[in-house]
Amino acid sequence: MPEHRKFWNEEIETMPRKQLERMQLERLKGQVERAYSTSTFYRELYQKAGVRPEDIRSLEDVRKLPFVDKTSAQDAYPFGMLVCELRKIRELHSATTPSRQFLPVYATKKDLSDWAERCARVLWMVGLRPGDSIQNSFRFGLSTGGFGFHYGAMKAGMMSIPASTGGTDRQIDLIVDLGVKAVAMMPSYGFYLAMRAHERGIDLARDGDLKVGLFGAEPTSPQMKDRLGELMGLTAYGEYGMNEFLGPGMACHCLHKRGMHTWADHFLVECVDPDSGEVVPEGIPGELVWTWLSAQGTAMIRYRSHDISSVTWERCPCGRTHPRIARISGRTDGALSIGGYIVYPSKLQDVMGLFPEVGDFHVILDSVKGLDCMTIRAQLRVGAGVEAERLALRICDAIRSYVVVTPRVEVVPAGTLGTEVGESRFRMIDYRRGSGRYGVRTE
């Protein structure tokens, strides 16, 4: 395919809205029918709501379907959202939930191919072309962060460098020595990498050859992206993805940066009032609700993201006709983004409840050299005869096991944090720049 062309897949990316919506309706009908016939979880959910597949006759009828979210999806573990034969699955990923259980995301060969297609569109949309190199510093593992752009780069004829996280000095060397053209990473890691390069006397804007940065997995303001661009000598673009839908590749800025383009041939995105669940008018902020229209392995239908944004179908100057979402401005469920991981305060409380020696505890979130850090300050109960250092290690191990994030743990004497009560009391203090919650304590 000609490298000078503007679109990766012009026919799809510029398809008229009415044609896209006809495609969405047919795929929606197919997803609901398959989920109803193969998934006990969805069949019981829809029967309880009094809705059947034949009730879906228009896109608006999707509103007849009940919502699904991380909490309700826990009931489907482990195979309840699987909608094909297990032998057809080629890759398994997962998303976090408010409990210790994870939410399995099953991908077939077709799902992986679709994922690569979506990410190839994104890479092409931000100006990358065959022969370019992209250093992928998202995590590779059960979370989907690293894999999408890796697959997309290979599909688009680019060199993928699966650097993952860590090894920062080596990552700097790769960028400079190989003349890497693009990076994909969390913005906090981008700041840390640029600061570490500066400590070594390296100016990435001067000594590197970067031109594109794809930043996601945590909240980022336009000002932060601009600053990343200055530090690294690139144009910073926001990208959006959820593990539940094999993100990244769900949405991304184009060159005009007037919202992030979603792909309507793969996803139906609604914006609803978080309290009533009613769809809000176009352009009005609300909670994003996603339906995976092209999935073969996992059914995700009317899945509440808890992300606050807005949706518009207004045509973009870039020529793409798919809807766009605004920057994620917050969440409705109180979940925290810590180093790119979604952490639920309720899960931290559950873990701390395993330690009867602990009374009050504080969770302190801060940023050190651009990277998120979490400190647990745990107060011993009166009369608790335990060794503080050993208890701190046990708490650290438990949180790392349940929550994935590794905290720093301080065990302090009774009376240090507050009055001793019968039940553990939880306070969170978030000092991170951009958190919107400077020094705010949550009881």
Image: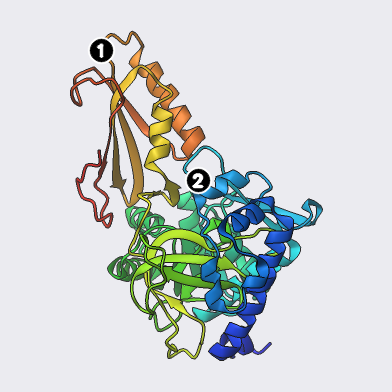
| Residue that extends furthest to the right in the rendered view of this protein | 87
Badge 2 density bin: few <14, some 14–19, many ≥20, Cα 10 Å? many
Tell me if residue 376 comes above or below residue 187 in the rendering. above
Tell me if residue 217 comes above or below residue 420 in the rendering. below
Check the picture and name the quadrant holding the C terminus. Answer: top left
Residue at figure coordinates x 45%, y 51% from the top left: 168
How far from the left and from the top, in percent, is residue 26?
66, 78
Camera sees residue 181 = no
Q: Badge 1 is on which residue?
A: 382
Residue at figure coordinates x 58%, y 65% from the top left: 149
Camera sees residue 329 = yes
Which mark is on residue 183?
none
Which mark is on residue 97?
2
Residue at figure coordinates x 40%, y 77% from the top left: 259
User: Amino acid under label 2?
Assistant: Thr
**Quadrant position of residue 354:** top left
Towards the viewer: 334 or 110: 334
How far from the left and from the top, in percent, is residue 175?
49, 63
Asked which secondary structure carries label 2, the reply is: loop
Check the picture and name the quadrant holding the N terminus. Answer: bottom right
How far from the left and from the top, in percent, is residue 97?
50, 45
How far from the left and from the top, in percent, is residue 308?
37, 64
User: Amino acid under label 1?
Assistant: Val
Towards the viewer: 252 or 23: 23
Q: Is residue 7 left or right of residue 238?
A: right
**Quadrant position of residue 359:** top left
Towards the viewer: 170 or 327: 327
